[in-house]
Structure formats: structure tokens, C-alpha cells
Amino acid sequence: MAPVTNARVLFSAIPKGYPIPGETTVYDTTQTIDLENVPLNGGILIKVLILSVDPYMRGRLRAPEVKSYSPPFTLGEPMAGGGIGVVLRSELAGVAAGAHVRGSLPHQQYVVAPGLTMLEVLERDPRLPWSVYIGVAGMPGETSYMGWREYSRAKQGEVAFVTAGAGPVGSMVIQIAKQDGLKVIASAGSEEKVAFMKKIGADVAFNYKTTDTRAVLEKEGPVDVYWDNVGGDTLDAAMQFASNHARFIECGQISGYNTGPQPMKNPTLIVSKSLSINGFIVGNLYPKYKAEFAAEVVPRLARGEYKFTEDVTRGLDRLGDALLAVLKGENTGKAVVVVAEE
Amino acid sequence: MAPVTNARVLFSAIPKGYPIPGETTVYDTTQTIDLENVPLNGGILIKVLILSVDPYMRGRLRAPEVKSYSPPFTLGEPMAGGGIGVVLRSELAGVAAGAHVRGSLPHQQYVVAPGLTMLEVLERDPRLPWSVYIGVAGMPGETSYMGWREYSRAKQGEVAFVTAGAGPVGSMVIQIAKQDGLKVIASAGSEEKVAFMKKIGADVAFNYKTTDTRAVLEKEGPVDVYWDNVGGDTLDAAMQFASNHARFIECGQISGYNTGPQPMKNPTLIVSKSLSINGFIVGNLYPKYKAEFAAEVVPRLARGEYKFTEDVTRGLDRLGDALLAVLKGENTGKAVVVVAEE
């Protein structure tokens, strides 16, 4: 078989604000790959099926000298992120052609991986599509479950406030908080998202673009557990209407990802309200909760006990657009890019 | 015996910035008290000996409609705070004349208290003066010990950064952190304070008014445990030079008490560095640590194993000045006002 195109999405320039498809993230079709003959050197050849698009990826589009928790992408090289692929050929013991792998994959159609350092062989529950394994059954769902278990110290009857509540992380947090017996206030940026948050059980769901967050929190709060996906002024509002001893789970602060950090206006409230504010990176919680998540959460997802939505983009050439949409909050549900069918 | 003057320090006007003696806090000698005949109605008559002057008192000089953790003082009435007195007369079972009491006392020379709701009868270790019982053996020392035990999760070899390190809280934190095997960086605002911090064991002590905090933290950090007494730009600096998973103990933010809250410039670091930030009010930790403190810390103080200094002001008429000095950081060591000798 002749070589085929191995399309990639390259990190081409450091974005100043939002990443611009065609400029900072460029779809490139100049490379080819000979699928039958490419040397594997003991590794595996993967056909990429689905890629995950997540807010944290904005942080990797940066200059290498800027330190942060996730490594920067390399200029001129493909971006990378969570994904699922199928093994086409294998020289690796224990991995057969046809197996599925999940993990960090470069944003390209075909990948030769030297081993399973960043990947795991994955079995699928027949009731769940593969895409869910990079969504609520994958990193975003793990983020919700593990962050909540570790930091919420939630008690029945308390009030939770969840931002970005229609996204994969927020929507799982809403459902877990309801299971724990909390009243849940949830916000997002469209009527469609508000409808979804109500459907999955939020007691109070509102569109922060058309409804004043402080007015809602004053009426429905005070807030005992704040799940922060957005930061900025919403974080200030949550502090203003927090109860004493409230727990703030700092999962993300997307409001500052493209514009630079936004200040917290009144940090003295941390003292006067005895707030407990915990930031976390989900990978650090894997040793404690990974097995529990697989045993508890994935089966419940398969039985339909948790609801979720996906925002599917088809074609690697549109990955840059999908990332921009996520950073602008235009997706409803977990954003995934289908690179290929099996 | 004829009635005697019962001098008081009144909360006379809400300060805009620093409290101004003679204006916002007024020494008043218009009241008298008949010590032999004043009716006790089953309570006790207390002669106030020593009053504590602490930064948190600034927060009580506010309008009643502003909510905060400690109740506001009442305009036209005496201020109040931690203090020690001797019982002159008693109609209360179990409390004899001559007993000493500690607790919340109004800022006046003589007090009729209906009971022991806000007071406790106190025994003194003969090796310690009474004043220490409102200092390192009292609320400030409890703040250091209980806050550190509850929130530091300190491990030997880690680096602590302690602000206001020459004050009663900070100086105890330095000594407890050294006991726990940490390297301690400490800051304060005068050369005299720097010398004291070195004397009590700080590995690195500096005057933040003449030495750049960021330069010190960059060289001596990163910071694993940050004890915050000051907030403001120093909090930003500590976040900038914090290690991943650093613990921030938010005890106070004096930099904003008189000027209004100062923003935290980059709260996204909470997420990217997995910071754990805990504010606390020491009273909430009493049930867990009060007995432990009395059994562990006070005997060590009496044996001279912890060092401390006091900044003694003599005369209730100078309490307003003492409070202003504390808020300006002009005291070295625990600020106390001696109202009367026994």
C-alpha cells in the first residue's frame, strides 16, 4: 500500500488572546506515512479515532520558558491531548492489533508509539461509546469525582454552586452533589445549557450572561461548596456569598486563560469567613481514587444513572475551531473531535 | 469609701483609615464607681489589670451593618478585648475575691460581670507573668499553635515563610516550625525585629522595608508553608514563589485593615500550583486543641523553651496609642496595656 497522508494540527505561533485557527493552530497535510512498512522498533502503530478538546490545553500554547503545571507544546510540532486510538500493528508484547488505547496522543491521524508510557489499553463497556472514555468516563469525569471527594467535605442539606455546569466536569459535579444530598445552584452561558443543567438535577440553574450571579447567590445561598471552573468576578461573587467554613474547589479559571489572570478582589474574606480553598490537578489524585472511579462511576454511567452530552466535531482539520469554541464557551457538553471511524 | 473614677476607652467614631486616639477612640473619665457598694446581683466585681491589643480589633471599629467574624463595637460604648483582672468582690459560687480571670473585658478600669460566660478563672504558673496569659500563653499563642497544627501539614526539611515574624503570633510560629524541622524564612519591618527573629531561630530573617521579598523567596524558597499575617503584595509574592502543593495559612491580612482590601493578583496560581489556602478564626479550633495547648505549650513557655517579647504600655489612657502602634507595626513583641498593678 502506498503511503497515505498523516494530517496533523501544529502549534504554529503563541496566541496573544484566543488561539486563532490557521495562525496559532495550523492544520497540516504535508506528511505521509506508510502504514504497512513504517518501522515500529518494538512499539505500536495507532490510528487515532477521537481526540479530547479541553480548556486546560490553552495553557500549553505558551512559550517554553513560562512554567505551569502541564508542559508547553513545542512550536512547529503537533499539539497533543487525551485521545483514543485503535492499534493497527504491534510489536509490543501484550498489545494486539485491534486493541484500543487511551492516553495522551499527538494531534495527528497516525502515531507510532514506542510503548505504553502515556497510554493504557482500554476495554469498553458495550453500553458506552468510546468517546465517553475521554469525557465523563475519562479525565473530565475523574476531575469531578476525585476533586469532589477530596475537597468538598460536603454534608447533606448544604448548598453547592457549580460554574460551567453544562460542561463535562460541571455536569458531573452537579449530579454527584445531588447524590450527596446538596442543593445545587449551577451557572452557564446559554439557555440551552441552562435547560441541560435543569435536566440533570440542578435545583437552580441560570444563564450568567442574562442573570446577575450575585442576585442568585444572595437569594439561594449562602454557598457552602463552590466548584470553580471560571475564576474572575464569579469567584469574587462566590466569596461574597460564601458561608463561614465554605470549601472552594479550584478546578479551573477559564475567564483568565485568554485574557491574563484576573485578580481576586477581597482575599481578606478567606480569613474572616474561614474559607478553605484548594486547587488541584486531577493527575495527583489518581493514586487515591483511580480504582474507585473505575469501580463506582463507570458502571453507573453505563447504567444511565449519570447524564451527559457531547459536542462532536468531525475531522481533524476542525480541531482548532473546536478548541476556540471551548475557550469561548460555545460548546454544550464534552467537546470531542472524531478523527476517524474505525 | 467614696466612689472612684472608672476610666474607659470609648469607640467614638468609625475610623476611615487608622483609628485616631482622641477622635475615634476616646479616653473618658466621666464615670465613677463605688467599689464597696456597687450591686453585683450575683456576679463579680473585677479590677482590670492588663489588656491585650491586637490587630483584629481594627475590624471591630466598624458600622454595625457591616458583617464580619467578630462583632462590631458599639459607638459611644467602651471597646473590649482580651484581658486579665483580679476579682475584688464576688457573689458568684466558686469564685473568691483575689481570684484572677481571663477573657473578654471592656476597656475600663472596673467591671461588674454577671458571670463567667466570657471569662475563665485562671491559675498562673509562678514562672510566668500574668501578661503572658494574654500573649504567647493566650490567644495569640493559641493562634500560632492551633493554626499550625491544623493546616500546615509540615514535613521536616520543608521551607516555611512567616510574616510579621516578630509579633506574638509570628514569633511562636517560627519556633514551632523550627521544632518541626523546617527551614524558616521570616520577615518584619525593623532591624530590631529582624534581630529578634534571628534570636528565636529563623534561618533567614529580613526587613521587608529595605529588602525585596521576592528576591529573598527566589533565593531561599520555594515556600512550602506560608503563614500569612499581612496579605497584600506579600501574599502575591508568596504565591509566586510557592512550591506545588504549598499550604497557605491565612491568619490575618493586616496590610488591608486600614486601607481596604488589597486584591490577590493571580489566583490562577491556586489551580496551577495545587495550593491549599485555609483561613481560620482561632476560636473555632479551641474544641480540638485547647487542652493540648495548655498541656504542651504553656509548660514549655514556663521552662523557657519558647522565647517571646512584650511591648508594654502603661495606663489605660494610652490604649488608643497602643492600638494605633500595633496597626502601624511599631510594636516589637506582644502589645499589652497595663491598666493597674495588683
Image (cartoon, coloured by chain):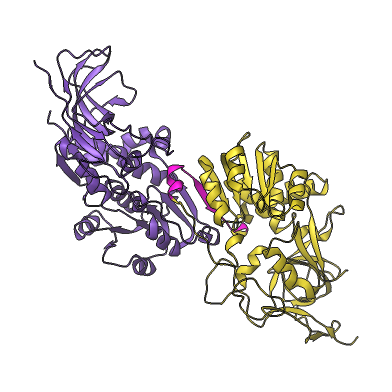
Chain colours: A yellow, B purple
Q: Is residue A47 above or below residue B304?
A: below
Q: In this rendering, is residue A167 above or below A13?
A: above
Q: Position of residue B101 (x, y in %)?
A: 25, 26
**Can residue B38 be seen in this snapshot?**
yes
Residue drawn at 37 percent across, 48 percent down: B252
**Residue A339 position within the rendered picture, expressed as x and y whole percent measured from the top left:** 82, 71
Residue B290 vs A247, above or below: the answer is above
- Between B22 and B86, the residue placed more toward the observer is B22
* Left/right of residue B282 with respect to residue A319 in the rendered view: left
Q: Nearer the viewer, residue B3 or A96?
A: B3
Residue B67 falls in image quadrant: top left
User: Residue A118: x and y, percent?
Assistant: 69, 68
Relative depth, front residue between B64 and B183:
B64
Residue B148, placed above or below residue B40? below
Q: Which image quadrant for residue A49?
A: bottom right
Q: Which residues are magenta?
A: A268-282
x, y (%) of residue B217? 37, 65
Q: Residue furthest right?
A: A1
**Looking at the image, which residue is at 16% across and 42% down?**
B312
Left or right, B75 with respect to A45, comes to left
Residue B157 seen by the camera: no
Number of numbered labels in the structure image: 0
- In which quadrant will I find the N terminus of chain B? top left
The magenta stretch spans residue B271? no
